[in-house]
C-alpha cells in the first residue's frame, strides 16, 4: 500500500513539474499579423476618427524586443513592467513623437462601427494613438496604448490582436454668445454706407439753406410792400 501511494506521489510530482516547465512555442517573426482597434465609449461608437500606429521595436523568436533607431532614446525594459508603468511609458513616447514630428507607420480612420483594422503587420512592439472627437458637446479622449504583437494567451501566441482603446469622456461648457456677437445670416445687419450718408446730409443742408433764403426774401418783400402802402 505504501509503495502504491509513493508511486502516485512520484507520478503526480512529475506531472506537475512537467506542466510548469512547458514553454511557449517560439515566435514566427515572419508571420503576417493584424491589429484591430475599437474606439467607443459605453455604447457610443466613435466613427471617422484618425488612428495612428507606430512601430517601436522588432521582436526575435525568443520574444526579445529590439527598438528601432528612431525610438532608441525612449526605449525601456519590457520585462516585468506593470500596466501603470506601461501607460506612463506610452505617454512619454507620445510626447516624444509630437516633439519630433515623427510619422506614423500606418494611419486609418475608424469605420461606422468605431473600428480600425491594421493588416499585414510584422510582429513587434507598437504604439497606438487615437484622435479626440467631440459629440453632442462632449469630448472623447483615447489614451495612447503600447501593444506587442503577437500576444501570449494560454501558452500560445496570437498574431491577430484585438484591443478596445481606453477612452474618457469630458463634458464641454457651452459658449454663451451675446446678441452683438451673433453673425448668423438671420441676424445680419447691413453696415450703412458712409458715403451715401454724407451725400444725404449735404443735400439736406443745401435744401435747408435755400428754404431759409427763400423765407428771408419773402419777409423782406412783404416789408417792402407795406412801406410802399404807407407812402
Image (cartoon, rainbow, N blue to C red):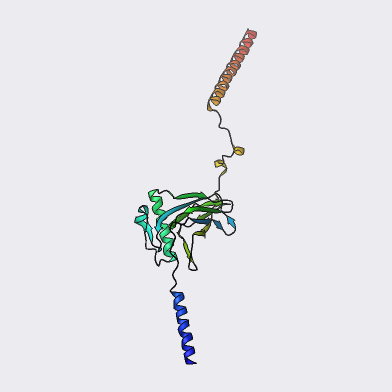
Above-or-below relation of 64 to 134: below
- Give the residue drawn at x 35%, y 56%: 72
In this view, the residue farthest toward the right is 229
Location of residue 146 by image quarter: bottom left
Q: 84 and 17: which one is in front?
A: 17
Q: Is residue 84 left or right of residue 40?
A: left
Above-or-below relation of 120 to 150: above
- Give the residue drawn at x 60%, y 17%: 215
In this view, the residue farthest toward the bottom is 1
Q: Position of residue 19 (x, y in %)?
A: 46, 75
**Placement of the C terminus among the 4 image quadrants:** top right
Q: Is residue 87 visible?
A: yes
Q: 106 and 15: which one is in front?
A: 15
- Give the residue drawn at x 56%, y 44%: 178
Location of residue 18 by image quarter: bottom left
Q: Position of residue 220 (x, y in %)?
A: 59, 13
Q: Is residue 166 visible?
A: no
Number of numbered labels in the structure image: 0
Q: Position of residue 209 (x, y in %)?
A: 56, 19
Q: 147 and 64: which one is in front?
A: 64
Q: Is residue 35 left or right of residue 62?
A: right
Above-or-below relation of 161 to 5: above
Q: Position of residue 174 (x, y in %)?
A: 55, 51
Amino acid at each position: 500500500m505504501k509503495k502504491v501511494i509513493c508511486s502516485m506521489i512520484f507520478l503526480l510530482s512529475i506531472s506537475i513539474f512537467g506542466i510548469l516547465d512547458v514553454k511557449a512555442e517560439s515566435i514566427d517573426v515572419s508571420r503576417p499579423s493584424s491589429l484591430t482597434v475599437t474606439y467607443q465609449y459605453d455604447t457610443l461608437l466613435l466613427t471617422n476618427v484618425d488612428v495612428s500606429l507606430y512601430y517601436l521595436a522588432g521582436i526575435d523568436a525568443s520574444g526579445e524586443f529590439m527598438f528601432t533607431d528612431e525610438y532608441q532614446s525612449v526605449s525601456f525594459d519590457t520585462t516585468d513592467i506593470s500596466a501603470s508603468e506601461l501607460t506612463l511609458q506610452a505617454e512619454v513616447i507620445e510626447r516624444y513623437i509630437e516633439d519630433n514630428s515623427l510619422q506614423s507607420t500606418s494611419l486609418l480612420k475608424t469605420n461606422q462601427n468605431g473600428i480600425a483594422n491594421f493588416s499585414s503587420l510584422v510582429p513587434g512592439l507598437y504604439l497606438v494613438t487615437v484622435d479626440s472627437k467631440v459629440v453632442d458637446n462632449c469630448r472623447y479622449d483615447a489614451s495612447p496604448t503600447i501593444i506587442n504583437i503577437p500576444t501570449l494567451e494560454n501558452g500560445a501566441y496570437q498574431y491577430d490582436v484585438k484591443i478596445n482603446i481606453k477612452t474618457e469622456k469630458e463634458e464641454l461648457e457651452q459658449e454663451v454668445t451675446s446678441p452683438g456677437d451673433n453673425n448668423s445670416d438671420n441676424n445680419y445687419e447691413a453696415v450703412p454706407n458712409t458715403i451715401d450718408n454724407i451725400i444725404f446730409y449735404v443735400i439736406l443742408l443745401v435744401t435747408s439753406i435755400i428754404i431759409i433764403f427763400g423765407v428771408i426774401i419773402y419777409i423782406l418783400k412783404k416789408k417792402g410792400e407795406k412801406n410802399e402802402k404807407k407812402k
